[in-house]
Image (tube, rainbow, N blue to C red):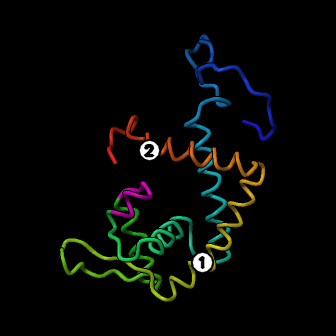
Amino acid sequence: MTGASRPPKSRRSAAAAPSPEGLTLDLERYVPAFITFIANKLSNSATAFYQGNFGVNVTEWRIMSLLAIEPGISAARICQVIGFNKGPVSRTLSDMQSRGLITIRVDPNDARTHSISLTGKGRATHDKVIVAALERERKLMSCLSADEQEVLIDLLRRLHNNLGAVTGETT
């Protein structure tokens, strides 16, 4: 994939014509590859930027932003929204707690569940990072018109809502 703009191609499969070795993907058309490559590059650059400027990695930022939206949520809810496994989320939460960014309390209604919230320090960090995150988004989306941005957001939401078609999970 290149950064160069290309004229629209005719509708065809992401699988190229068979080669002597078998079928190959056309990475210029294979949507899962585009999404993965974009996500990986965004995530890696965000970690470097957020770590260097705010002392948090991208996973911590994702958790912090979710806790700002849904204070007191459980680790299971974090895993559900972010799409991470429980082990890495649990380790990240433990580290964030030890650094004073979050508090983890036993849910009074269910001792098996923990309520997770940002501390004052965590909220202050969130409030600094969100400004940078929104600026990064603005720069990323600057190649699209306002109408194109709305179409992209709608299409991404529809793909997200259709993930069960390939994961087998229901939302």
Residue nearest the viewer, comparing 81 with 38: 81
Give the residue furthest to the front.
147
Across and down, in percent, residue 27 comes to 64, 30
Give the residue furthest to the bottom.
120
**1 to the left or right of 30:** right
Helix, strand or loop at mark 2: helix
Provide the residue designation for mark 1. 55
Mark 1 or 2: in front is 2
Helix, strand or loop at mark 1: loop
Q: Quadrant of residue 22?
A: top right
x 68%, y 71%: residue: 132
Across and down, in percent, residue 118 comes to 44, 81
x 47%, y 82%: residue: 101
x 58%, y 37%: residue: 33
Q: Amino acid at mark 1?
A: Gly
Across and down, in percent, residue 96 comes to 45, 78
**Is residue 4 located in the magenta-colored stretch of the structure?**
no
> Are circles 1 and 2 on residues that touch, CB within 8 Å?
no
Across and down, in percent, residue 104 comes to 34, 80
Q: In terms of secondary structure, what is the magenta stretch mainly?
A: helix
The number of numbered discs placed on residues in the rendered structure image is 2
Residue nearest the viewer, comparing 10 with 122: 10
Provide the residue designation for mark 2. 161
Q: Amino acid at mark 2?
A: Asn
Mark 2 nearby-residue class (10 Å; few <14, some 14–19, many ≥20): few
Q: Which residues are magenta?
A: 77-85
Q: Quadrant of residue 37?
A: top right
